[in-house]
Image: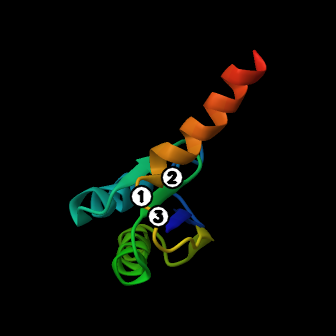
Amino acid sequence: MLFAFSVAPSTTDDPEGSVSAAVADAIAVVRDSGVPYRLDSMFTTLEGEWDECMPVIKAACDAVAKHSPRVSLVVKADLRPGFTGQLDAKVERVEQRLRDAGA
C-alpha cells in the first residue's frame, strides 16, 4: 500500500513564508522510521501496511506541531494489498508505456 501525505504548519514566522524547517523535522521522523519512502516537492509517499504507515504520519504531524499550533495534513492512499515495491514499479510502468509509444 502507498500512502502519500503532505504535512505543513498553517502558520510560520519565516518572512518569506517558508515552512521548510517544519517539513524537514517531519521528514526526519519518516527517515528514522525505516518505512520505505519517496520525497518530492509536494508529498512524501510511504510504502507499507496501515499499522506501520499511519503512526509515522501521526509522528510527522507531531513534529510539525512543534513549529505551529495549527497543522495541515493531506493524505492519499493506494490500498492494494499484496503488492510491494510499488514506489518504483508504478513509475517504471508509466515510463515503459511512454518508451513504447515513442514519447
Q: Is the Cβ of the residue at disc 2 closer than 8 Å to that at disc 1? A: yes
Q: Which residue is mark 3?
A: 83
Amino acid type, label 2:
Val
**Residue under the image location 38 percent in, 61 percent down:** 26
Residue type (three-letter) at the residue carrying disc 1: Ala
Point out residue 23 in the picture as x, y percentages from the top left corner.
Answer: 44, 55
Q: Earlier in the sequence, mark 3 or mark 2?
A: 2
- With respect to residue 48, does 93 lie above or below? above
Residue occupying image coordinates x 59% and y 48%: 42
Where's residue 40, x and y in %? 52, 43
For this rendering, which residue is in front, 97 or 62?
A: 97
- Residue 15 seen anywhere in this rendered image of the structure: no
Q: Earlier in the sequence, mark 1 or mark 3?
A: 1
The crowding category of the residue bearing disc 2, from other C-alpha atoms within 10 Å (few below 14, some 14 to 19, many at least 20), is some
Q: Nearer the viewer, residue 64 or 67?
A: 64
The residue carrying mark 2 is: 19
Residue 63 is left or right of residue 75, and the answer is left
For image coordinates 58% across by 73% down, the residue present is 79
* Mark 1–mark 3 distance (CA, rounded to whole Å): 32 Å
Q: Residue at x 41, y 67 (%)?
A: 67
In what element is the residue under mark 3?
loop
Q: Which residue is mark 1?
A: 22
